[in-house]
């Protein structure tokens, strides 16, 4: 065995702990070699495919055959191997599960071998010795349970232990659960090394213990079970206390380590489904961006619905479920319909366009969805034109679409395929900081000959000076502008005209608003009073 042989080092540690726990017969070098062989056999069983835990029983029996059979030996063995082997073989959850399954069989084999030895000497045992042996067995099982239900690094109850506690019958009243996740723990352990990381976790555990029933449920997660709560304020207080305790630096080998954490909270009747506590606390943990977050069933349901809808959107697009309604754009001077705005609809989902458009933007589906809706609108505009209705077709573009390098070629290709003249297409870009920074894309779209409209003008991102350098041909005033004084509104309309832009007022809902805007020189209007969105037919 070489000095850099990790199994050799582990075999040496194993032998020292066995010697401390009881008598080791024979020459120490031979005993160490025998333990090294058992470790190799154990590692081979962990890595074997398909996995079979049966060799664990044989290894346990061989320990007894080596006369390393003092009762404390098995507890020492379980604790040492459960804590060290997963890191040597592979620190994933499947490896740890296999190691624990083999250790379970190892205990069984160890106990069975000792029992067989005891049976062979049964005639020499008296009744008191038998009672003692039963106590030893109970103790061995207790030690195994300790290894299976506690985190090897901190000795705290683990997630399995916490789940068993929450599932215990007879618990009444209300409970709270505070789940803490350490920020950047992986970076800390990468920088400090594994051993210092383990010591940091142990120091964190010692600092958090006074808060109550503490568990170590994942490498970077601790949980505090709060009993007898009367409402959310009780768990919020515990969470605040935990974050304050973690704020002070942790001295590790001369380094003052600063740790921050996030907290997800659950508080409800103790009779709730035991399997839901950690699930819901982890969901709340995702919301904890600005302090502790309390689990909210309504918010969770909305998120689940959004996730389901987001997952269904690609198939819905393939099924043709996304359609368009068209709202008239009216010239105010003579009430002539000069065009329509194409508005996206998803009837099957019963969602408003703002909701599913945001989902599409988050998932990236906005690019194929946007091309699909643009094609629909242009095809309808071309059909109306062939029927003698030469209407301007106004289509909304998401700021996310403006970042797509394939947007301009896609627009040009759509115009070519549908036969709609570029001058009869207007693209509406919502006034956002990101959109107004896409100068090159806006210029390329303008060069195609399409009209560009600045939607929701006046929401605060642009100024008239900024618009001077952008190829917008239309300003669509946000509906909020209808509430400003008439002289201010006239000034804005005149300024847009001075920049060569026509002006459309959105949200016209009364005859008085229409009359005022016409008198102020506004070019076009749009709103429920002038025409509600409707299918093309």
Image (cartoon, grey):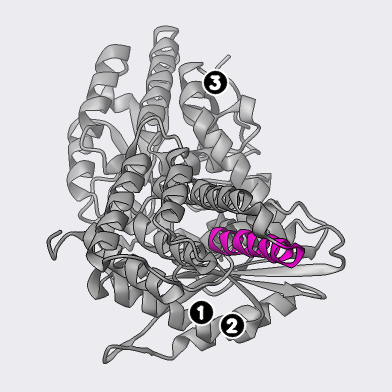
Give the prevailing secondary structure in the magenta stretch: helix
Residue 471 vertical position relative to residue 317 in the rendered view, above or below: below
* In the rendered image, the vertical position of residue 442 relative to residue 261, given as above or below: above
Picture quarter with the C terminus: top right
Q: Residue 281: in sight, yes or no?
A: no
Asked if marks 3 and 1 touch (Cβ < 8 Å), the reply is no
Q: What stretch is highlighted in magenta?
A: 126-148
Residue 284, how many percent across, how many down? 59, 61
Instruction: Please say whether residue 56 is one of the residues in the magenta stretch.
Output: no
Q: Distance between the residues labelled 1 and 2?
A: 6 Å
Q: Determine whether, in the image, residue 304 is placed left or right of residue 421.
A: right
Q: Please check the rendered image and state whether residue 127 is part of the magenta-colored stretch, yes or no.
A: yes
Verify CB contact (< 8 Å) between mark 1 and mark 2.
Answer: yes
Question: SS of the residue at dot 3?
Answer: loop
| Res. 321 mark | 3
Question: Which residue is identified by label 1?
Answer: 205
Residue 288: numbered disc: none
Residue 142: quadrant of the picture: bottom right
Q: Is residue 304 visible?
A: yes
Sequence-earlier tag: 3 or 1? 1
Q: Dot 1 lies on which element?
A: helix
Indicate the quadrant where residue 471 lies: top left
Q: Residue 209 carries which label?
A: 2
Distance Cα–Cα, label 2 vs label 3: 55 Å
Q: Is residue 178 left or right of residue 77?
A: right
Query: In front: 145, or 158?
Result: 145
Q: How far apart are marks 3 and 1 (CA)?
A: 53 Å
| SS type, badge 2 | helix
Neighbours of disc 2 within 10 Å: few (<14), some (14-19), many (20+): some
Drawn side of residue 144 relative to residue 34, left or right: right
Question: Going 53% across and 38% down the picture, which residue do you hit?
Answer: 356
Residue at the image position 31 percent from the left and 41 percent from the top? 44
């Amino acid at each position: 065995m070489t000095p850099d042989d990790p199994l050799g080092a582990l075999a040496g540690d194993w032998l020292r702990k066995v010697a401390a726990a009881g008598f080791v017969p024979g020459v120490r070098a031979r005993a160490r070699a025998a333990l090294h062989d058992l470790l190799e056999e154990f590692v081979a069983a962990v890595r074997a495919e398909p996995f079979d835990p049966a060799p664990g029983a044989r290894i346990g029996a061989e320990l007894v055959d080596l006369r390393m059979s003092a009762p404390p030996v098995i507890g020492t063995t379980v604790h040492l191997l459960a804590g060290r082997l997963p890191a040597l073989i592979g620190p994933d959850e499947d490896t740890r599960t296999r190691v624990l399954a083999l250790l379970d069989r190892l205990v069984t084999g160890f106990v069975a071998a000792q029992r067989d030895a005891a049976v062979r000497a049964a005639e020499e045992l008296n009744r008191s010795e038998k009672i003692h042996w039963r106590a030893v067995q109970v103790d061995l099982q207790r030690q195994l349970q300790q290894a299976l239900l506690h985190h090897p690094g901190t000795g705290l109850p683990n997630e399995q232990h916490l789940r068993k506690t929450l599932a215990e019958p007879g618990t009444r009243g209300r409970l709270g659960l505070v789940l803490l996740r350490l920020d950047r723990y992986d970076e800390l352990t990468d920088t400090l090394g594994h051993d210092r990381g383990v010591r940091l976790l142990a120091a964190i555990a010692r600092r958090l213990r006074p808060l109550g029933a503490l568990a170590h449920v994942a490498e970077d997660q601790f949980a505090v079970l709060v009993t007898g709560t009367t409402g959310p304020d009780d768990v919020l207080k515990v969470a605040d206390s935990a974050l304050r305790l973690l704020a002070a630096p942790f001295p590790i080998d001369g380094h003052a380590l600063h740790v921050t954490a996030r907290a997800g909270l659950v508080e409800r009747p103790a009779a709730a489904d035991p399997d839901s506590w950690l699930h819901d606390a982890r969901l709340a943990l995702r919301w904890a961006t600005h302090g502790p977050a309390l689990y909210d069933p309504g918010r969770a349901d909305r998120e689940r619905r959004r996730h389901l809808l987001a997952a269904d959107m690609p198939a819905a697009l393939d099924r043709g479920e996304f359609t368009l309604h068209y709202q008239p754009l009216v010239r105010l001077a003579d009430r002539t319909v000069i065009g329509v705005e194409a508005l996206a609809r998803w009837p099957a989902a019963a969602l408003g366009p703002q909701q599913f458009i945001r989902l599409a933007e988050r998932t990236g589906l906005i690019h194929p969805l946007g091309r699909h809706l643009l094609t629909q609108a242009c095809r309808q505009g071309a059909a109306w034109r062939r029927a003698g209705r030469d209407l301007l077709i106004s289509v909304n573009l998401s700021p996310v679409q403006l970042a797509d390098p394939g947007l301009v070629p896609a627009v040009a290709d759509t115009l070519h395929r549908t036969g709609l003249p570029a001058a009869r297409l207007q693209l509406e870009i919502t006034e956002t900081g990101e959109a107004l920074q896409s100068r090159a894309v806006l210029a390329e779209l303008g060069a195609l000959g399409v009209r560009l409209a600045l939607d929701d003008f006046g929401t605060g991102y642009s100024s008239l000076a900024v618009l001077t350098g952008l190829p917008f041909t239309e300003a669509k005033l946000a509906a909020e502008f209808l509430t400003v004084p008439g002289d201010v509104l006239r000034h804005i309309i005149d300024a847009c005209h001075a920049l060569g832009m026509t002006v459309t007022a959105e949200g016209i809902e009364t005859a008085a608003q229409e009359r005022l805007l016409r008198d102020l020189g506004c070019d076009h209007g749009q709103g429920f009073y002038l025409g509600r969105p409707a299918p093309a037919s």
